Image (cartoon, rainbow, N blue to C red):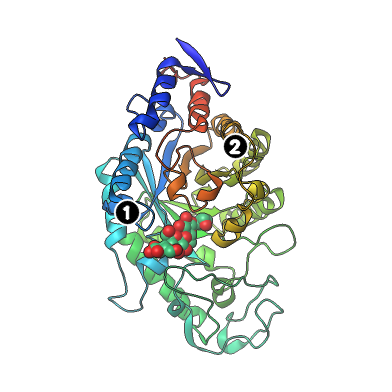
């Protein structure tokens, strides 16, 4: 028996399960699993935090809630990504041989491997969440304000390179790693630190982490001339820091799938820069194996815009991984596709859009229709969080499950899209 729910045709059993879900306080075993619905097409992943992989309470969730989150993750997802615990700041906070904190990252990998999931590492080189010691050295910082003009200095060979884009002020987080304006490492020193870090981290999880975000968010936002954003990586090493990072990661695990990962690729101007960057890396023979498109989008993002983005990105001939999917339902978030936590918080003021659940469901349906249309290219779709309560943009209620792990109309909309495909294994009963 079929019935309709928020305009989506769903099996009667699902409706019953959904109506009962509040009473059960959580997901129902009768629900179709996302990973099964899309098994013939792509991995369905989720970003997890340390409380989920270690089974501990967090500042957001009681232990009971965490256990429900774990059950949800195991039921619906066959891929996991590390939301935070592999960022340099957390996995390698100090210099020296005792500078690594592997505990939560080890637990993350063990969780994924023991549950038969594909494990994705996030992220090796990023302008954000990198401790100051990484960039520190004895070379004086540029005299001119960062980003104002090139101020070449043969003694520091590239240390003052700038592309004219003001370097954003890094935001504190995880205990106050802020902007670094002190004396800098040389290009060679910084590359050596990068190489050591990548070889140590990628080498440790070789064969278990199958896919790595090697470089994260290197492209400058919007239109304009510079392709790359200014960052200490860019300023000290120069633009080839990206190629070097991929080279080191490939040395450390030749079988790992290496991704370039960025946000805002729904914007045609930023996407053009992505195409320029990746083509340039390909021409140089750099081992970049997949495009990571974060897809932190909003409810106004349509099938057509995602279809266009995927069509253009597919011209690179690489697999496309949707790496950080969420859809902001907040009033102020309807134009924003940025990835910055503080900026996002300001866009979520003003409440949710009217009929938020329905609009979210419509948006997700369009996105998954596009992912399925491009399934020859789209190999991974990873949600950035298990539910609205643990999401970095939770005020925008951006995920398929609410804070009680109840499936929202968007969940049914997404599964219904899978049911429209021809594969017999994914047809709803
Ligand atoms: O763990 C501490 C906790 O002990 C403390 O009480 C609490 C107080 O605010 O902070 C907690 O740490 C926060 C951490 O998230 C865990 O929730 C940090 O302050 C906060 O800065 C951190 O934000 C993360 C952000 O990246 C910055 O690293 C988000 O969780 C994470 O979702 C977000 O993910 C990024 C991707 O890595 C890259 N693409 C964009 C995406 C969204 O910004």
**Which mark is on residue 290?**
none
Residue at 61 percent across and 40 percent down: it is 310
Q: Depth check: 329 or 38 in front? A: 329
Image quadrant where one finds the N terminus: top left
Residue at 69 percent across and 51 percent down: it is 272
* 380 is higher (above) or lower (below) than 162: above
Q: Residues within 10 Å of mark 2 (few under 14, many from 20)?
A: some
Q: Depth check: 306 or 353 in front? A: 353
Residue at 70 percent across and 57 percent down: it is 222
Image quadrant where one finds the C terminus: top left
**Residue 94 visible, this angle:** yes
Answer with the quadrant where ligand 1 appears in the image: bottom left
Secondary structure at numbered mark 2 = helix
Image coordinates for residue 153, horizontal then vertical, percent: 62, 87
Left or right of 30 on screen, residue 290: right
Q: Depth check: 379 or 147 in front? A: 147
Left or right of 177 on screen, residue 98: left
Q: Depth check: 391 or 302 in front? A: 391
**Which mark is on residue 356?**
2
Q: Mark 1 points at which residue?
A: 51
Left or right of 176 on screen, residue 333: right
Left or right of 365 on screen, residue 191: left
Residue at the far top: name it.
1
Q: How crowded is mark 1: few (under 14 residues within 10 Å), some or many (20 or more)?
A: many
Residue at 40 percent across and 20 percent down: it is 16
Image coordinates for residue 273, horizontal then vertical, percent: 67, 55
Q: Quick check: is the Cβ at mark 2 less than 8 Å away from ligand 1?
A: no
């Amino acid at each position: 028996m079929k019935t309709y729910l928020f305009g989506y045709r769903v099996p009667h059993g699902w409706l019953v399960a959904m109506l009962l879900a509040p009473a059960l306080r959580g997901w129902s075993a009768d629900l179709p699993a996302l990973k099964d619905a899309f098994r013939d097409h792509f991995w369905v992943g989720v970003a997890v935090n340390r409380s989920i992989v270690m089974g501990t309470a967090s500042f957001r969730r009681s232990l009971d809630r965490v256990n429900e989150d774990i059950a949800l993750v195991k039921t619906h997802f066959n891929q996991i990504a590390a939301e935070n615990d592999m960022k340099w700041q957390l996995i390698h906070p100090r210099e020296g041989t005792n500078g690594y904190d592997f505990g939560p990252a080890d637990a993350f990998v063990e969780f994924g491997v023991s549950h038969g999931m594909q494990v994705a590492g996030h992220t090796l080189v990023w302008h954000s969440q990198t401790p100051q010691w990484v960039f520190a050295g004895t070379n004086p910082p540029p005299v001119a304000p960062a980003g104002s003009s090139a101020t070449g200095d043969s003694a520091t060979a590239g240390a003052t390179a700038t592309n004219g884009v003001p370097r954003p002020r890094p935001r504190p987080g995880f205990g106050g790693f802020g902007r670094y304006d002190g004396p800098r490492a040389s290009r060679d020193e910084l590359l050596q630190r990068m190489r050591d870090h990548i070889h140590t981290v990628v080498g440790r999880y070789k064969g278990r982490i199958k896919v790595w975000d090697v470089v994260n968010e290197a492209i400058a936002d919007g239109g304009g001339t510079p392709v790359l954003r200014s960052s200490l990586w860019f300023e000290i090493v120069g633009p080839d820091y990206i190629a070097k990072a991929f080279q080191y990661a490939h040395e450390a695990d030749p079988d790992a799938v290496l991704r370039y990962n960025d946000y805002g690729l729904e914007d045609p101007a930023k996407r053009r820069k992505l195409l320029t960057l990746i083509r340039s890396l390909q021409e140089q023979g750099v081992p970049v194996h997949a495009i990571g498109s974060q897809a932190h989008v909003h409810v106004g993002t349509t099938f057509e815009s995602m279809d266009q983005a995927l069509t253009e990105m597919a011209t690179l001939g690489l697999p496309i991984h949707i790496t950080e999917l969420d859809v902001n339902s907040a009033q102020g978030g309807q134009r924003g596709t940025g990835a910055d936590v503080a900026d996002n918080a300001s866009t979520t003021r003003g409440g949710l859009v009217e009929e938020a659940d329905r609009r979210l469901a419509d948006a997700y349906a369009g996105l998954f229709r596009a992912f399925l249309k491009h399934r020859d290219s789209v190999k991974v779709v990873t949600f950035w969080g298990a539910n609205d309560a643990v999401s970095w943009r939770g005020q925008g209620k951006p995920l398929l499950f609410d804070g009680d792990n109840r499936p929202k109309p968007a969940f049914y909309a997404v599964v219904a899209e899978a049911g429209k495909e021809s594969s017999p294994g994914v047809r709803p009963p």
